[in-house]
């Protein structure tokens, strides 16, 4: 079975916007074809808000294209995700969106959690490997 990796919203934003310091490692991993890239609807929400608010069609289209990719798996936000997010938030003093991302990755059986937020490493360490970019 292919390993699963969960992309935090910040990583998706850096990837879609092709930010120089982040694009290459994410692009290499996504296009290697050796893992199942996983996101949640929370990622979609967080990525689309800014371009939608700004009325900026080009980035909005780029994000929509990313989320519509056939090889992207969008994990459902179930009650078990919210229960685990509550526990993670209480135990590690996480913000609600961070707890939801991490819980979604854990519940989806992800092996890796890609983020640029060092604060999530401790909360994730018992469940999956954190890749900090």
Image (cartoon, grey):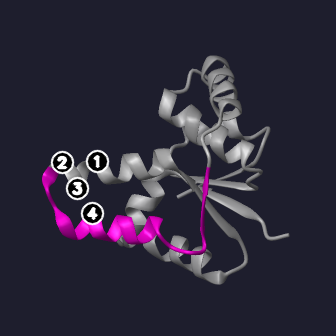
Question: On screen, 127 above or below 109?
Answer: above
Residue 65 is a magenta residue: yes
- Marks 4 and 3 sit apart, C-alpha to C-alpha, by 6 Å
- Marks 4 and 1 sit apart, C-alpha to C-alpha, by 9 Å
Q: Which residues are the magenta region? A: 54-75
Q: Are marks 2 and 3 in contact (CB under 8 Å)?
A: yes
Residue underneath mark 3: 51
Quarter of the N terminus within the rendering? bottom right
Name the spot of residue 49 as percent of width and height, x first.
Answer: 28, 47
Q: Circle 3 — which element?
A: helix
Q: Are marks 4 and 3 in contact (CB under 8 Å)?
A: yes
Name the spot of residue 104 as percent of width and height, x first.
Answer: 64, 43
**Residue at screen point 47% across, 69% down:** 68
Q: Are marks 2 and 1 in contact (CB under 8 Å)?
A: yes
Residue underneath mark 1: 49
Residue extending farthest bottom = 32
Q: What mark, if any, has residue 53 been given in the picture?
A: 2
Q: What mark, if any, has residue 60 been given in the picture?
A: 4
Question: On screen, 88 above or below 120?
Answer: above
Q: Are marks 3 and 1 in contact (CB under 8 Å)?
A: yes
Q: Circle 1 — which element?
A: helix
Alpha-carbon neighbours of circle 2 within 10 Å: few (<14), some, or many (≥20)? few
């Amino acid at each position: 079975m292919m390993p699963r990796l969960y992309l935090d919203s910040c990583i998706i934003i850096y990837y879609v916007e092709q930010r120089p310091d982040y694009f290459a490692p994410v692009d290499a991993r996504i296009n290697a074809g050796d893992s199942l890239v996983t996101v949640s609807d929370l990622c979609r929400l967080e990525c689309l808000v800014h371009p939608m608010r700004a009325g900026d069609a080009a980035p909005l289209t780029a994000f929509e294209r990313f989320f519509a990719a056939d090889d992207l798996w969008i994990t459902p936000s179930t009650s078990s995700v919210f229960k685990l997010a509550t526990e993670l938030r209480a135990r590690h003093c996480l913000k609600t969106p961070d707890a939801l991302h991490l819980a979604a990755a854990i519940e989806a059986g992800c092996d890796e959690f890609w983020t640029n937020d060092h604060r999530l490493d401790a909360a994730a360490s018992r469940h999956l490997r954190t890749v900090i970019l």
